[in-house]
Every structure is written in structure tokens, then in C-alpha cells.
Amino acid sequence: MAQINSHYLKLKSGYLFPEIGRRVSEFAQKNPAARLIRLGIGDVTRPLPDAVVKAGKAAFDELSRAETFRGYGPEKGYEFLRRAIAENDFKPRGVVVDPEEIFISDASKCDTANMQELFDQNCRVAIPDPVYPVYVDTNVMAGRTGSADGQGRYEGLHYLSSGPESGFLPQIPRERFDIVYLCFPNNPTGVVATKDELKRWVDYARANEAVIFFDAAYEAYITDEHIPHSIFEIEGASECAVEFRSFSKTAGFTGTRCAFTVVPRALMCRNSRGEKVALHALWHRRQSTKFNGVSYPVQRAAEACYSDEGKKEIRELIAYYMENAKFIHQTLSKMGFAVYGAINAPYIWLKTPHDTDSWGFFNELLHKAHVVGTPGAGFGACGEGYLRLSSFGSRADIAEAMERIRQIYDI
Ligand code: MLT
């Protein structure tokens, strides 16, 4: 019998969101009359912008005619989209990104998960806690860790613990690490890093020859004009960082699938002989071997996000969710909860009442209010005692969820 990759057996239970889904389905089966309000996984609910739909349909029409049919697309993605990204996402912020440094993909989740494959097994990895669980799990799968301890922390990974005392910002470690994951605006806490804070990370990475994996999937939700949207707004970052971006939360593409990763040509790592190797070439090699790209109609649909009509519709979408976030933040604060996030991110991070543990509070909300959140402990040991709510529901659902919570917890 074939022996499986034993590192997979080190993983704790299921991946967070399917695990929540399993518990919620079990509850729904036993309580068919309960109307659940789902503020758990950050899945958008508003329809795609018209500009996006029109462009996607037109592209399908092109594929239906022999003279405009296309088969496999270019490995990095179509130039029209990479150029639109460079011109609209980076240039207005004073960042020069060559379209050749942009790789179109189906998800930041996959790209953040796969990037570590390019690095040696013995690389020392630092990961914020709490944070998006994909970073930890994929390093476990890759065999870069030992087993998990009682808190669910894996031997061999370095956790950058953060809590309310540091404003949930991970602190720069004293030791040297080869790979550092950063996620701003942060999932799950919703906090952001200032230019000075990001500069300190870039300085650390350059001084230690480390690579920063910068996940900026929620940058479109930044409302404070002084907060950087890209790590490349910091001088020297193109020598030490890759950046992950997504159309999922920005333009409602969670079901449509399109994202991109910027791997600067200037970013050098070392081979086992200590010689410099460009990460850009290796990522290209990896993607062209293991990935077949995003479909042409979806790339045309993504390009339409940068048209005048698309930009306007996206601004409205984001404003809608951020209005929800503000309402949740205000309502829960008035009730006496300690609440974080929601200002530059679509997530609300709240302290559980009466020191209930995360899964306990998740269960209470599910059973008493029929509201689904995400237990903070699922994002790391430092998330214990917190719960994340997403603002991606409809206005009516959010209002009802807050009213149901108020009836139970006006603390
Ligand atoms: C989340 O809820 O954290 C995200 O939706 C998960 C994801 O984007 O994969």
C-alpha cells in the first residue's frame, strides 16, 4: 500500500472553515426551523458589478466565434490585465511594478499556500498569531514543522504573538528568520500597519536577508489615507517582499476566482552554495508547471474592475460592506463588548463575554442567536477568547443578527 505524506497527519482536525461548516450543518439538520445568519467565512453576498458581468459575457461571446476563439492563455496571465493592475493598483500610489512581475492566479489563498514550496525545508519561518490559518497549515504539510502542542502551536514555527497590548500588531523578532508572513489589513483582527511599521519590517528583512510574504487581499477596504496599500510603497521592499492580492473581496469574485501575486525581479534568494537566485524565475517555473491559469472571460471581467464604471461600482460595494462593519462595531461597542477592526477592514474582532472560550462563544451564538461567527482560536493560540464577525452579509441580516445578539448579551 502506498505510504502517505506523514506531515498531513500532524494537522489539527479539519481546515477551519469546513470545520465550522460541518458544525453549522449539524446544527441546521437538528434545528430545521432556525434561520441562520452567516457572518463566519468572509464570503461576499452582493452581486458582481455590471461592468464586470458585461465584460465577462462579451469575452464568452468572443470564444463562441471561430475568428475570435482563444485556447490556452499566457502563463502569467493576459497582458491586458497585468497592465491594468500595474497602472491602476500601483502607479497612483507611486509604485512602479512592471506587468512582467505580476502573475495572475485563481486565489491569494493558493499563492500564499504555494509560495513556500520554493524555499528550503530548513528555512526558519515566522508567522503572526492570530492570522489566516493557511500560512501555518501549508508549512505543516510541507514538512517544515514537528507536531502541535496543547495550544495547537507547531514545533519549528515561530509565532509572532499579538494581543490588545500591541494593538494586535506582530512585533519584529530579535532572532533571524528566513520567511516572515504579514497580512495587512489583517485577517482576522482587521488591524493595519502604518508606513513606519512596514518600514521596520522591510529594514528587518533586508538586514536578515529574509523574504516577506505580504498578504494584501483586503487592501481595498483601507479607509485611512495614510495607511499603505502595498508593501512596495516602502523603499527597498522590492528586494525583500512578494505581495498577494485578490479580486475576491474587492470585486465580489469569491465564486468567480481571480487574484494576482507580485514577485519583483529584484528579489534575490540564495541557493545551497550561497549564490543569488531570482525568485521571479522560480515562481514562473512553478506556475507554468503546476497551474493552467485563469480563464479568458474571468480575466476580461477582472480587467473591467479598472474601467470607470467598474471602479465606481466597486467603491459602492466596498462602502456597503464597510457601512455594515461600522454598524456592527458601534452596536457591539454600545453593548459593552471590546471590539477591534472594522475601520480599515471588513472584519470585526471581538472579545468574548465573561471569558468564554472562542468555540464556546461560537456555540452559544449559534445555538441561542442562530448567528455564525468564526472562533478566534481557529486563527491561532492568541485568538483564543475572541470571535471574528464578517461584514459581508446583507444590511437586513446584519441588523437582525445584532438585534438577536443584543437580546442575549447586552452586557
Ligand atoms: C476568511 O473568511 O478568512 C476568508 O474568506 C477565507 C479565504 O479567503 O480563503
Image (cartoon, helix red, strand yellow):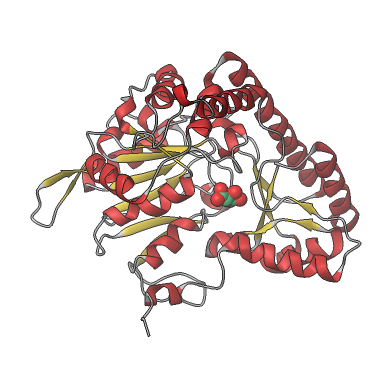
Lateral position of residue 403 relative to residue 173, left or right = right
User: In the figure, residue 1 lies in which quadrant?
Assistant: bottom left
* Furthest residue toward top: 308
Give the image location of residue 126, x and y in percent. 36, 56
Give me the residue at 52% from left, 53% from top: 132
Give the image location of residue 26, x and y in percent. 76, 70
Lateral position of residue 170 relative to residue 389, left or right = left
Residue closest to the eye, 317 or 333: 317
The C terminus, quarter of image: bottom right
Q: Can residue 308 be seen in this view?
A: yes
Give the image location of residue 71, x and y in percent. 41, 35
Residue closest to the eye, 328 or 120: 120
Give me the residue at 47% from left, 26% from top: 66
Q: In this view, does 111 lie above or below 159?
A: above
User: In the figure, residue 284 lies in which quadrant?
Assistant: top left
Q: In this view, does 260 lie above or below 273?
A: above
Give me the residue at 64% from left, 35% from top: 343
Lateral position of residue 124 relative to residue 317, left or right = left
